Amino acid sequence: MKRRFARWFARGAIGLCTAAACAAAPPTGLQRDVVFSTPAPLARNEELLRRLVSPLHAVDMQKAMAGNPLAMQASPLAPAQQHFALYVPTSPAPASGYPLLVFVPPWNDARIPSEWVPVLDRNHVILVTAAGSGNDADVLDRRDPLALLAALNVMQRYRVDPARVYVGGFSGGSRIALRLALAYPDLFRGALLDAGSDPIGTAQIPLPPADLLHRFQQSSRIVFLTGSDDAIRQAQRARATESLEQWCVSDSDGIMLLHTGHALADAAGLAQALAALFKPRAPDAAKLAACRARNAAALAKELADAESLVDAGHFKQAMQALTRIDAHYGGLAAPRSVELLRALGSRGETH
């Protein structure tokens, strides 16, 4: 995957815009009803399943696509049929390129809060958000690939700093943003979570394969924005933070918005969040290694216990154990979890 990603970067598919695109002086300021034409390789079905779906669940989805040989290479979205709102600061890009924030909303229209514009200008931040990406939209077939399509097309069109590409959201959109930051740490270097979050390492937000999780642990910055009067999201944040620590993610920060309930961050809150995002902290190498070793040992024991159940013919219990492993460890447990599933299938057991 790293080699493929490097090839896309080199030929201008992602990363800083090509010389020709930069020379064309793409428009700045607020742009509505923007249409992007370039497909996003990272939003193909094969990548969505590999990164965002637990391995055992992905097996089921791959079976459903087995009758269509092109399905795994296809994307769930046609780029030219999607619409976005885009804000590009009118000031020249910094020497390293613009920071980029891909914003996932809970509402369905593509809009950029007017009070955010001065903050985006001061920080030289591009913001892009999609239409039809609200809480009622399908997550895997729409909300996830829309954010990826937005990021990759803006990076192709404008001079963006690949080290400062972030995904954010509000409320239900914030929960999608965390999911994307976890699965795509080679694209997004952090997440701005405004009034919404979930624990990672669950059936809803499964862990990606080890290489991606390790990158997330090492180089992703997570910033929580929570209203002081929003008790539900404070509890969500506590659970999410605990899960990040369990999975060896140390670079997170929280900002409390005083006298605020469940409401979109105002200009001052956005400014605080961007300032925090721009100050990543490297993890302690020894602590990170020790944390990874603890999780690896726990996973190895659970996989060994599940294998023993298979060998002993306790197929129902083995399937229950595999289901728990798949939900908790996700991509970390593959390919062994998938091999054990196939062993059960060879004995006539299904899940």
Image (spheres, grey):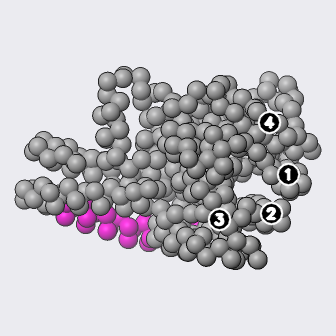
Magenta residues span: 281-306
The residue lying toward the viewer, choosing from 302 and 293, is 302
Instruction: Give the number of marks.
Output: 4
> Element under label 2?
loop
Residue under the image location 41 percent in, 60 percent down: 202
Question: Which label's residue is closer to the chain start, 3 or 2?
Answer: 3
Q: Separation of disc 4 and disc 3 at Cα?
A: 26 Å
The residue lying toward the viewer, choosing from 95 and 150, is 150
Q: In the current view of this chain or complex, which residue is farthest to the right?
A: 91
Q: Separation of disc 4 and disc 1 at Cα?
A: 13 Å
Q: Which residue is mark 3?
A: 195
Q: Separation of disc 1 and disc 2 at Cα?
A: 10 Å
> Element under label 1?
helix
Mark 2 neighbour class, 10 Å CA radius: few under 14, some 14 to 19, many 20 or more? few
Going by the numbered disc 4, the residue's amino acid type is Arg
Question: Which label's residue is closer to the chain start, 3 or 1?
Answer: 1
* 231 over 314 or under it: above or below: below
Question: Which label's residue is closer to the chain start, 1 or 2?
Answer: 1
Q: Which residue is mark 1?
A: 114
Quadrant of the image occupied by residue 161: top right
Question: Which label's residue is closer to the chain start, 4 or 3?
Answer: 4
- Residue 302 located within the stretch drawn in magenta: yes
Q: Separation of disc 2 and disc 4 at Cα?
A: 21 Å
Residue under the image location 38 percent in, 71 percent down: 294
Q: Separation of disc 3 and disc 1 at Cα?
A: 19 Å
> Element under label 3?
loop
Residue under the image location 10 percent in, 59 percent down: 314
Evaluate if marks 4 and 3 touch, with contact meaning CB atoms under 8 Å apart.
no
Mark 1 neighbour class, 10 Å CA radius: few under 14, some 14 to 19, many 20 or more? few
